[in-house]
Image (cartoon, helix red, strand yellow):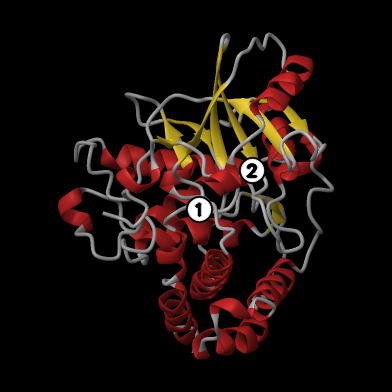
Amino acid sequence: MSALDDAANSGLASPSEAHRLDEAALARWMAANVERFRGPLNVSKFKGGQSNPTYRLQSADGVYVLRRKPPGPLVSGAHAVDREARVQDALSQVGFPVARIHGYCADTSVIGSEFYVMQLVEGRIFWDATFPDVSGEQRPSYFYAMCDVIAQLHSIDPTSIGLGDYGKPGSYFSRQISRWSRQYQEDPDAGRDANMDRLVKELPERIPQNEEIAIVHGDFRCDNLIFHPREPRVIAVLDWELSTLGHPLADFAYHAMMYRMPPHIVAGLAAADLAALNIPSEAEYIERYCRATGRETIPDWHFYVAFNFFRLAAIMHGIAGRALRGTASSTQAIERGKTFPELAALAVCALENLS
């Protein structure tokens, strides 16, 4: 099982004191801003979610989901719940599978931070990338459902849905490498790593000379998807905090990185017998994406993989820092932070395949 296993990350818990909400103030806001809302509220916190705390809101008229910024000091530009709400609202207008947004609140006096409220989507979440609860016969259909949805996302014209200004155009890799390098370097609490220092230096020198722009999710994994309760169909894509306008091949390579990811870090297939499980190979998966997006091949594949291991290493480094400062939103944050050096090493391995 992955470190993101069902028992540790699914289900509900009572919020800690730091994550408790002012339920009366929240109910007043919802009565004024959410159509058909009727109190009272009963609030519980989802166990998963390392970055933006996520809550289940039981009310007299149904169930909602709330995501908020975490308490405590935050890295500048991180935890942008306003962007999460905006992109999901825009994508829902063209039939892309996301939860419906009921409202966004910028007023930090309501519960202590910005937040938004969205639809609760009922379905299946797979925390293990081998999809152990699915029959071998059906497993390829679940994998190709994931592939088709990310291809669908990358095929949407951002301008046509009001997201033409959702990110800076061009120089995506330069900007991203700079951003994550800076976040790594400016957070000393989690320590330094020789592989990470090498990546900060060498990745900018290896960037492919091709520019593409698409809406990118930024954290597209099986455990950020809700599948239909019985069918191999994605009915909602979750966790849009890292979304922006960026390079679609960076986004796809992050998703396909599951083939090289050790399962104890996040949902990965590095130790899996793909043939025995009837899971499409990495090459078959890439071919499916290429067909869906009108490509013949993906040159520089190893760069995209190296970049994504580096990026995930930087994210885990940030989680480690927040855990040490006591502001991480999940009890699993300390364990996740410990994976930072291993991810940096995997990024270097991929980078060396470029030589």
In the rendered image, is residue 93 in sight? no
Q: Nearer the viewer, residue 186 or 255?
A: 186
- In the visual, does 353 lie left or right of 231? right
Q: Which type of secondary structure does the marked residue at label 2 adopt?
A: loop
Q: Position of residue 82 (x, y in %)?
A: 75, 42
Q: Position of residue 159 (x, y in %)?
A: 81, 41
* Mark 1 burial class by Cα count in 10 Å: few <14, some 14-19, many 20+: some
Which numbered mark, 2 or 1, is in the foreground of this view?
Answer: 2
Label 2 sits on residue: 155
Give the residue furthest to the left: 276
- In the visual, does 79 lie left or right of 249? right
Q: Quadrant of residue 34?
A: top right
Q: Nearer the viewer, residue 354 or 173?
A: 173
Q: Quadrant of residue 111?
A: top right
Label 1 sits on residue: 290
Q: Nearer the viewer, residue 166 or 41?
A: 41
Residue positioned 63% across, 35% down in the render: 21
Give amino acid for label 2: Ser
Residue positioned 58% across, 53% down in the render: 51
Q: Are marks 2 and 1 in contact (CB under 8 Å)?
A: no
